[in-house]
């Protein structure tokens, strides 16, 4: 059976759910595909604390009353805009509550193939159905973009695994674990694993861990006001008024970033927000975890059930071994890695080092195909790497799609006409609602 709608959102995380809430309010028929909050629920370790402040951890809706603050009030949880840490479990539960209240037209299915035909998108779904749409919004977060250092590519799981590929850390108890990376993910995992009984070593490429400074409260009124409003994780000198102003502009007005030339945008993304650990993690790590700085992995191999790493540090070469190596080495956007997108569409996309070139309305050069979330960061700035970026992306995208939908209303060609030889049901939503994948050693996990 083939069904149709005007717009399809692929991905039901914070960006997809927020965009759906705005499209619903705008009256645009659409469906959203995917398990709600899937990556946050399944691939984040229990006990992890969000780096973003509570006020910057909202999903967004044109209706009032669906903020993190309201969720905490309803559940009698502590809340203040800044100064407390949000457990990932609370954030997931909040997202599921948001979805249950505002996004009932969700289908928890995967897209296995997406092609373009006669100006429409044809999506083959995991439940063997087909969906045809005029527009598609990709809101997939960092799915499929895990970055692996060359020396560790091709090595088997679970001996080598990326930090974005597992949830529960119970497997790490009493294990020797090497974590590669110097950012928040690496440092947070190191703290959590040590606290459940793992023996952890942290390999950092830089001269030392780059700790973010504890926010100061004694500066002038302008700095205090800006700091309270900056939803974007602060970069450069986080206590400098000029840095705070820059962060504020990029946080609240991503269109400013979009107007910059490509080289300047690249420089800001690459140098402004370097990997760092949150100041409140410091006392859980320093003096408690073995940190090897200025290291590079030259070679790695599996020997007798152990990962053996050849490490270069300065002019010295040494070898260390571990039961598991966890790669907290970040993500590299490459839209071509989404294998469900047809080769024809991938060949047509204008990409800059894997990132799509987007118009001011989040549209790619393939008409009707939009991208929001971290994959849009090269066009709209570092705010899009955080949940907070949905504050700008969701309403802006919805306004644009709503205008297009209304303009087309007088000369409507429904998606079903793209494939008239097969039965088609046209509708705006199905009304459907919706573990750790870290395998045991030796299992054939995908």
Image (tube, rainbow, N blue to C red):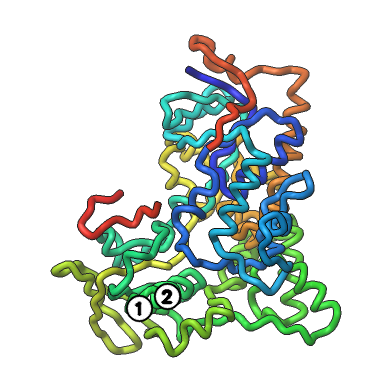
Looking at this rendering, what residue extends furthest in the right direction? 221
Is any part of residue 350 visible from this angle? no
In the rendering, at what x and y percent does residue 205 appear?
42, 79
Question: Mark 1 = which residue?
Answer: 200
Q: Residue at x 72, y 50 (%)?
A: 66
In the rendering, at what x and y percent does residue 82 appear?
71, 71
Q: Does 86 appear above or below 61?
A: below
Q: Does 76 appear above or below 409?
A: below
In the rendering, at what x and y percent does residue 29 appear?
67, 28
Q: Tell me the CA gap for discs 1 and 2.
A: 6 Å
Name the side, left or right, on which 284 lies relative to 365.
left
Looking at this rendering, what residue extends furthest in the front direction? 76
Question: Mark 2 = which residue?
Answer: 190
Q: Tags 1 and 2 in contact by the CB under 8 Å rule? A: yes
Q: Nearer the viewer, residue 183 or 98?
A: 98
Name the side, left or right, on which 270 lies relative to 126.
right
Mark 1 or mark 2: which comes first in sequence? 2
**Mark 1, other Cα within 10 Å: few <14 / some 14–19 / many ≥20:** many
Q: Secondary structure at mark 2?
A: helix
């Amino acid at each position: 059976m083939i069904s149709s709608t005007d717009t399809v959102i692929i991905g039901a995380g914070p960006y997809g759910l927020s965009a759906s809430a705005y499209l619903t309010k705008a009256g645009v028929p659409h469906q959203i595909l995917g398990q709600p909050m899937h990556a946050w629920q399944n691939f984040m370790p229990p006990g992890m604390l969000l780096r973003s402040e509570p006020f910057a951890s909202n999903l967004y809706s044109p209706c009032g009353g669906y903020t993190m603050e309201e969720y905490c009030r309803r559940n009698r949880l502590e809340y203040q805009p800044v100064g407390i840490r949000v457990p990932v479990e609370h954030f997931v539960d909040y997202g599921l509550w948001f979805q249950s209240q505002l996004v009932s037209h969700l289908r928890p299915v995967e897209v296995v193939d997406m092609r373009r035909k006669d100006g429409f998108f044809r999506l083959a779904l995991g439940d063997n159905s087909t969906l045809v749409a005029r527009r598609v919004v990709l809101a997939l977060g960092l799915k499929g973009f895990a970055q692996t250092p060359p020396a560790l590519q091709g090595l088997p799981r679970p001996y080598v695994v990326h930090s974005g590929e597992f949830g529960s850390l119970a497997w790490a108890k009493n294990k020797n674990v090497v974590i590669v990376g110097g950012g928040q993910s690496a440092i947070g995992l190191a703290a959590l694993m040590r606290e459940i009984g793992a023996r952890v070593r942290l390999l950092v490429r830089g001269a030392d861990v780059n700790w973010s400074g504890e926010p100061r409260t004694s500066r002038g009124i302008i700095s205090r006001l800006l700091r309270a409003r900056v939803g974007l994780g602060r970069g450069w000198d986080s206590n400098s008024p000029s840095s705070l102003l820059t962060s504020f502009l990029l946080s609240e007005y991503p269109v400013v970033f979009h107007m910059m030339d490509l080289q300047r945008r690249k420089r800001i993304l690459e140098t402004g927000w370097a990997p760092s650990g949150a100041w409140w993690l410091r006392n859980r790590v320093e003096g408690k975890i073995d940190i090897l700085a200025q290291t590079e992995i030259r070679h790695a191999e599996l020997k007798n059930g152990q990962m053996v790493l050849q490490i270069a540090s300065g002019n010295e070469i040494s070898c260390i071994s571990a039961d598991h190596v966890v790669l907290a080495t970040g993500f590299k956007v490459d839209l071509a890695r989404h294998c469900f997108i047809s080769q024809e569409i991938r060949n047509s996309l204008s990409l800059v080092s894997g990132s799509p070139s987007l118009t001011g309305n989040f549209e790619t050069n393939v008409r009707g195909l939009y991208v929001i979330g971290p994959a849009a960061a090269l066009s709209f700035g570092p705010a899009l790497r955080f949940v907070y970026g949905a504050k700008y992306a969701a309403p802006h995208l919805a306004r644009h799609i709503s205008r297009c939908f209304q303009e087309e209303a007088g000369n409507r060609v429904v998606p079903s006409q793209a494939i008239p030889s097969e039965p088609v049901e046209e509708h705006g939503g199905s009304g459907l609602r919706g573990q750790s994948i870290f395998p045991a050693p030796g299992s054939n996990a995908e």
